[in-house]
Amino acid sequence: MTAASPLERSLARLLNYGTWLASAAIAAGLGLVAMHGSIGASHPENVSWMWLATAGIGLLILLPVMRVLLMLLFFLYRRDYRLALAAVLVLTIILTGVVLGLRTASGAAG
């Protein structure tokens, strides 16, 4: 069995703790809503707790992006510019997808 590199250990920690944090936020938000009754317009007090579950979902969505960002920083630190350029390209593709998705969603709604 080979020893894990510092990058692999950092990525494992990021994904492990990030997943646990996001899962805890989702569970706490949904648990608080459940303790106060059902979700719906007739229960506006539950909306104040849904932000916690929404934040957890947002964190789960951001974890892959944070992974690529961590890899970019690691490659720049190691002066591996070829792999850093690949990480920048991946981040650019992700950002382009987000911008196009937001633009399409706002255009469809309007």
Image (cartoon, rainbow, N blue to C red):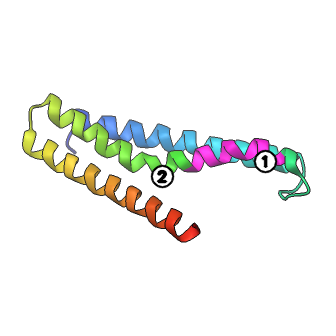
Question: Range of the magenta residues?
Answer: 46-57
Q: Of residues 43 and 27, which is closer to you in this image? A: 43
The image position of residue 17, as x and y in percent, is: 48, 37
* 90 shown above or below 70: below
Q: Residue furthest bottom?
A: 108
Q: Of residues 92 and 87, which is closer to you in this image? A: 92
Residue 54 visible in the current orientation: yes
Q: Magenta region, mostly helix, strand or loop?
A: helix
Kind of residue at badge 1: Val
* 100 shown above or below 56: below
In the image: residue 9, left or right of residue 63: left
The image quadrant of residue 16 is top left
Q: Residue furthest top?
A: 77
Q: Which residue is at 32% across, 34% downward?
A: 10
The image position of residue 71, as x and y in percent, is: 25, 40
Q: Which residue is at 39% across, 56% downward?
A: 99
* 13 shown above or below 85: above
Numbered circle sitting on residue 83: none
SS state under label 1: helix
Q: Which residue is at 25% across, 53% downward?
A: 90
Give the residue number, with chain letter if any, for mark 1: 47
Give the residue number, with chain letter if any, for mark 2: 61
Q: Residues within 10 Å of mark 1 (few under 14, many from 20)?
A: some
